[in-house]
Image (cartoon, grey):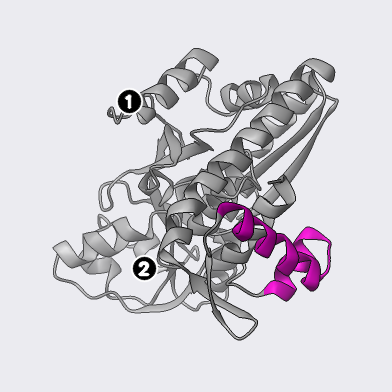
Amino acid sequence: MNFQQLRSVREARRRGFNLTEVAQALHTSQPGVSRQIRELEEELGIELFVRVGKRLTGLTEPGEQVLPVIERLLVEAENLKRAADDFASAGSGRLRIAATHSQARYALPHAVRDFRAHHPDVSLHLQQGSPQQIAKLLLEGEADVGIATEALAQYPELVALPCYRWTHAVVVPPDHPLSTSGEPLTLARLAQFPIVTYEPGYTGRSHIDEAFAAARLTPHIVLSAMDADVIKTYVELGLGVGIVAAIAFDEERDRQLRAIDARHLFEDNMTRLAVRRSAFLRDYVYAFIQTFASPLRREVVDAARHQAAEGAAEPVLAWSRAA
């Protein structure tokens, strides 16, 4: 049994049993992948995959049972290498951060700047995606830290630490009735206009939908996007009224728009920072986490990971971040 065999099995599942894609991911040949899988099956004395001819079509029942063990073995092998690297190259290495666009664009820049000032020998790799994609990157060991508002707390293999609370704002052109009438902003008034906001599953969109549903109102959402800058661009063009994270509005940069506080309309949102529960975290990973969210000291992160392993409730650590 060797790690290449284990990686071949794991990648076969991840790549939808497409051995061509597995071979590309592992930088080898398709026959080589097939041989690695078959040799492992022969050593274990069980078939891990359902086959139709030479094609893999799924996992057998023994395969379903064995795959989590293979995942754990590969995770621990990675942890072993990282632990060795921590001693062999203290203070240098690579930090892979996965974040949604809103977090990467508005919440991360100052933390990245401050972290780089103290850890110049650590190279940063920033990946952007949906909350579900970020969780997948963490679970597959392709990211060290994930940052998003939604979804991360739904995965038991992840420790999703609360970082800060934030609210939404309504953005409109300067001469828009919502900005000039002097009347208080209500859901009923907001629902009278076409709306441009986030895609479902992004940046607190669920709280927007829940607020309108609770008020028995149906908003006319004419465009949805993952990116607050895209939303603001279409608001400037007159497509509709924007609902964005308050932190995404900058008076200096967004001079063609006005922001109206909407915290009384929509529930507060929670940004979370997640790590894989079983991952070995190098010293500089802990340093970055605390740079991004100062209450998340090393002992707090470790305690949360231990609590997660025992099924305890998450700690309450979040504070509000001003717009």
Coordinates of residue 75 in the picture (x, y in percent)? 60, 39
Dominant secondary structure of the magenta stretch?
A: helix
How dense is the environment of label 2, judged by Cα within 10 Å: few (below 14), some, or many (20 and up)?
few
22 displayed left or right of 171: right
Does the magenta-highlighted stretch encompass residue 24? yes
Q: Is residue 249 visible?
A: no
Depth order, front residue of 147/302? 302
Determine whether the residue tagged by mark 2 lies in a helix, strand or loop.
helix
Depth order, front residue of 167/85? 85
Coordinates of residue 129 in the picture (x, y in percent)? 59, 58
Coordinates of residue 20 in the picture (x, y in percent)? 74, 75
Instruction: Say which amino acid is labelled 2.
Output: Pro
Coordinates of residue 83 in the picture (x, y in percent)? 70, 22
Q: Give the answer, above or below, for where 53 lies relative to 199.
A: below
Instruction: Say which amino acid is labelled 1.
Output: Val
Q: Which mark is residue 316?
A: 1
Magenta region, residue range: 19-44
Depth order, front residue of 4/297? 4
Determine whether the residue tagged by mark 1 lies in a helix, strand or loop.
loop
Q: Residue at x 85, y 26 (%)?
A: 121
